[in-house]
Image (cartoon, rainbow, N blue to C red):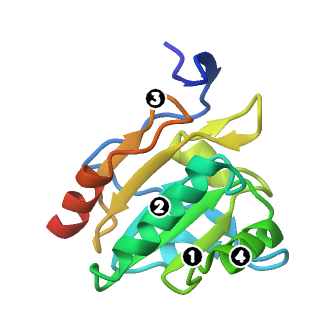
Amino acid sequence: MARTVTLKGGPLALAGSALKVGDKAPDATLRKDLVSDMRLSATKGTRVFSVVPSLDTPVCAAQAKRFQQEIGSLPGVTVYIISTDLPVAQKRFCGAEGIDPERLVPLSDHKDTDFGLKYGTLIPDLRIECRAVFVVDGNNVIRYAEYVPEVADHPNYDAILAAIRAC
């Protein structure tokens, strides 16, 4: 059975398989900037992969800002904002919104959608990611996985924060 999400009620197919709590977090290659790649296997500690369709939309911007607010009370946690936006657009967004790129690290899946395919977040028809959040512990095990059914809705921040604190 095909996996889908909706955008304003209209169904959109997702590529890849859904990940669940207890799965090993797949490695994926993303772009830090226009020329530098970053492998998720190079990241350490408790990590949050905050996946958004585009930072240039109100809900995605609000999601990034919410994690920016919460990150101060979460020592040792790094949040990665993942989208198919170009790295220059991500950098511009972070600068305009006062996002600290050392604690809320933007990563682009634009080049080859490696993350979207491995994490099951790619909407191939639009070449964007669905809204999703993964909390990964220091042993590289997924402790929280949420694929938001309606792309325009927010994730469950309370459940995400509880999962982070339990790591």
Q: Position of residue 97 (x, y in %)?
A: 64, 74
Q: Amino acid at mark 2?
A: Phe
Neighbours of disc 1 within 10 Å: few (<14), some (14-19), many (20+): some
Label 4, label 3: how far apart the Cα atoms are: 29 Å
At mark 1, the secondary structure is strand
At mark 3, the secondary structure is loop
- The circle on residue 30 is none
Q: Amino acid at mark 4?
A: Ala
Q: Nearer the viewer, mark 1 or mark 4?
A: 4
Neighbours of disc 4 within 10 Å: few (<14), some (14-19), many (20+): few
- The circle on residue 149 is 3
- Locate the C terminus by quadrant: bottom left
Residue 87 location, quadrant: bottom right
Label 3, label 2: how far apart the Cα atoms are: 17 Å
- The circle on residue 96 is 4
The residue pinned by badge 2 equals: 49
Apparent side of residue 28 relative to residue 160 in the rendered image (left or right): right
Neighbours of disc 2 within 10 Å: few (<14), some (14-19), many (20+): many
Q: Position of residue 160 (x, y in %)?
A: 29, 55
Q: Earlier in the sequence, mark 4 or mark 3?
A: 4
Q: Amino acid at mark 1?
A: Val
Q: Nearer the viewer, mark 3 or mark 2?
A: 3
| Vertical side of 149 occupied by 155: above or below | below
Q: Earlier in the sequence, mark 3 or mark 2?
A: 2
Of 61 and 130, the residue lying toward us: 61
Apparent side of residue 158 relative to residue 126 in the rendered image (left or right): left
The residue pinned by badge 1 equals: 105
Q: Earlier in the sequence, mark 1 or mark 3?
A: 1
User: What residue do we see at 29% from left, 74% from top?
Assistant: 138
Of 132 and 115, the residue lying toward us: 132
User: What residue do we see at 35% from left, 72% from top?
Assistant: 70
| Vertical side of 3 occupied by 118: above or below | below
